Image (cartoon, grey):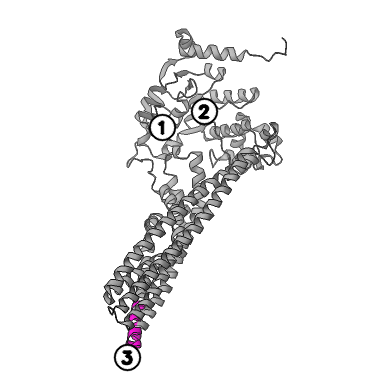
């Protein structure tokens, strides 16, 4: 946990060091103050009041030191907790913008959102409320056990053995509770996803008669959450009972052993009574540590999730980025790529897209077309070979330079919960309203503006929920047009458009090719035919042919098969029953 705090605080980790110093002073003062009670009580029981009174002065000093240390560490802990909560989002954000774009999967983004909300609260509560009792009680217990060995080593050894036993029991019970908490967290995330799914997909559910309150996936998730909640409750009860019972067993063993020593005249009765009082005080912090074990374990797990993000390796950046030598040129040179340790997605892919031309990628699903786009935008680094943009390997460019060259229109379009105008303006923040309107007209967004209640100022909702899939894609194309980058990547850009708007987009793609390098993945025949170059991939991720439309048809092979299938599909019609 403390190691995780050091990672979270980063350059401000000295705050934690100062805080821990004062907590240790506080715990040490507590332990020494408890030890001074042994000679005090011993002399008092022996009737030596003067000798007993002499121990009041060191006791008073230790109490004063402990009080001052308690106040200072409390203030330092609160400052550290507030600071860590305030800067945690900044540290996460600053680090995540350096991570590979491929890191941001849908599941990963959901985890990050949980971390940013729940994890931040755990960091604050742990720093303000949990570190002090854990560290102070541990330190004071160690001081007491060490000091007790000087009074009677036999009872000291027994208490050390008892402390080890309590630590093992506490560790086991906290691990058991932490496992239940992790399962509960997973079940909660699943329920949240199912609830959102149930709310967002009402049209589909109602169409198929499954919109009632007994929607099976949601009901199963809720039932699973209830089962895990019950199991966690029973584990909590069992953990509390184990901790409490183990404390009582160890304390009883100390009392029984001390009584045996006294009966057999192996220890002075007055000293034994003082040690019993110290032992009773000693097991208080030990019991508190046991009670905090499960909470501490859960806090540690949350902190580890945060540090897991912060410890993720950044996308390597060059110390001295190279200058671009051939603006608008894309080159893949013997590129191979594999996701994780799975089978290769791309094998020995090589082609060049020259400035002012349009290159179309065609091939079956899974042939690696979208992966090529992601490598150009450096979502990932290639496994072998090189991807060059602007004449320079993307690994030798900084992120700003690379992204300045690219406009991207992908299948998964995300719109922010802002006005339609501002969602397009993201393409170029300094664009004028006239420039936005021109890009919108070319992309077919203008008709959308006319039907929205507040026109350009209409908020499109979270993820663009107020617009249809085709409309969201048109807004994305308008962004790319507005940016006017030297390279434009279109991934299935016309897949969700009606024929009229598809014609708008096809015209805009051709117009962009006059000034930009256009790379497009499209199954529309008109888009493929208009390309200056067609790169054909097979289902193993290899380039099997490159050329213009008529050249590829003449050569036959994979492209001719693709063309025959597409033209046959384009001629399909719906016939009435019986015809």
- Residue wearing tag 1: 339
Separation (CA) of disc 1 from disc 2: 20 Å
Residue 573 makes an appearance in the image: yes
x, y (%) of residue 306?
44, 51
Sequence order check: which comes first, mark 3 or mark 1?
A: 3
- Residue wearing tag 2: 491
Foreground residue among 400 and 432: 400
Quarter occupied by the N terminus: bottom left
| Residue appearing at x 40%, y 74% in the figure | 280
Foreground residue among 43 and 111: 43
- Residue wearing tag 3: 48
Residue segment shown in magenta: 32-58
Circle 2 residues within 10 Å: few <14, some 14–19, many ≥20: many
x, y (%) of residue 480?
53, 33
Left or right of residue 391: residue 491: right
Q: Image height check: is 442 above or below 257?
A: above
Eye-nearest disc, 1 or 2: 1
Separation (CA) of disc 2 from disc 3: 92 Å
């Amino acid at each position: 946990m403390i190691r995780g705090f050091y990672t979270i605080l980063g350059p401000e980790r000295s705050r934690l060091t100062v805080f821990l110093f004062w907590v240790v002073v506080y715990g040490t003062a507590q332990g020494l103050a408890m030890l001074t009670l042994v000679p005090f009580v011993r002399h008092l029981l022996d009737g030596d009041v003067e000798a007993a009174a002499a121990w009041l002065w060191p006791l008073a000093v230790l109490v004063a030191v402990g009080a001052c240390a308690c106040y200072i560490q409390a203030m330092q802990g609160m400052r550290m907790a507030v600071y860590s909560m305030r800067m945690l989002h900044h540290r996460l954000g600053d680090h995540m913008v350096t991570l590979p774009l491929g890191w941001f999967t849908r599941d990963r983004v959901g985890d990050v959102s949980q971390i940013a909300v729940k994890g931040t609260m755990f960091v604050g509560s742990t720093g303000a409320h949990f570190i002090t009792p854990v560290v102070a009680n541990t330190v004071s217990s160690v001081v007491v056990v060490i000091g007790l060995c000087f009074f009677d080593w036999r009872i000291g050894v027994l208490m050390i053995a008892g402390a080890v036993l309590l630590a093992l029991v506490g560790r086991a019970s906290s691990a058991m509770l932490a496992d239940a908490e992790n399962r509960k967290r997973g079940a909660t995330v699943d329920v949240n996803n199912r609830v959102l799914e149930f709310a967002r997909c009402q049209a589909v559910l109602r169409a198929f008669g499954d919109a009632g309150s007994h929607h099976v996936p949601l009901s199963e998730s809720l039932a699973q959450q209830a089962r895990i909640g019950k199991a966690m409750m029973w584990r909590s009860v069992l953990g509390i009972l184990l901790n409490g019972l183990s404390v009582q067993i160890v304390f009883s063993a100390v009392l029984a052993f001390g009584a045996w020593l006294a009966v057999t005249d192996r220890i002075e009765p007055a000293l034994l009574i003082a040690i019993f009082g110290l032992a009773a005080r000693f097991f208080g912090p030990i019991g508190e540590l046991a009670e905090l074990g499960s909470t501490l374990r859960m806090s540690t797990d949350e902190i580890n999730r945060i540090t897991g993000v912060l410890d993720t390796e950044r996308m390597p950046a060059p110390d001295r980025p190279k200058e671009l030598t051939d603006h608008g040129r894309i080159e893949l040179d013997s590129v191979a790529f594999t996701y994780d340790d799975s089978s290769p997605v791309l094998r020995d892919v090589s082609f060049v897209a020259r400035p002012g031309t349009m290159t179309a990628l065609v091939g079956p699903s899974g042939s690696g077309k979208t992966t090529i786009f992601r490598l150009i935008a450096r979502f990932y680094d290639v496994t072998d070979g090189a991807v060059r943009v602007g004449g320079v390997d993307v690994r030798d460019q900084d992120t700003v330079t690379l992204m300045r060259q690219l406009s991207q229109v992908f299948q998964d379009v995300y719109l922010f919960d802002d006005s339609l105008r501002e969602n397009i303006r993201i393409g170029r923040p300094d664009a004028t309203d006239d420039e936005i309107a021109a890009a919108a007209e070319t992309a077919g967004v203008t008709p959308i503006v006319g039907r929205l209640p507040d026109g350009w100022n209409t908020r499109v909702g979270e993820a663009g929920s107020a617009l249809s899939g085709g409309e969201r894609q048109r807004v994305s194309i308008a962004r790319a047009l507005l940016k006017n980058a030297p390279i434009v990547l279109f991934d299935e850009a016309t897949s969700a458009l009606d024929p009229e708007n598809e014609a708008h987009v096809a015209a805009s793609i051709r117009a962009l090719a006059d000034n930009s390098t256009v790379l497009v993945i499209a199954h529309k025949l008109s888009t493929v035919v208009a390309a200056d170059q067609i790169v054909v991939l097979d289902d193993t991720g290899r380039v099997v042919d490159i050329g213009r439309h008529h050249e590829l048809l003449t050569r036959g092979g994979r492209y001719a098969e693709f063309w025959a299938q597409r033209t046959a599909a384009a001629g399909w019609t719906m016939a009435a029953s019986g015809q």
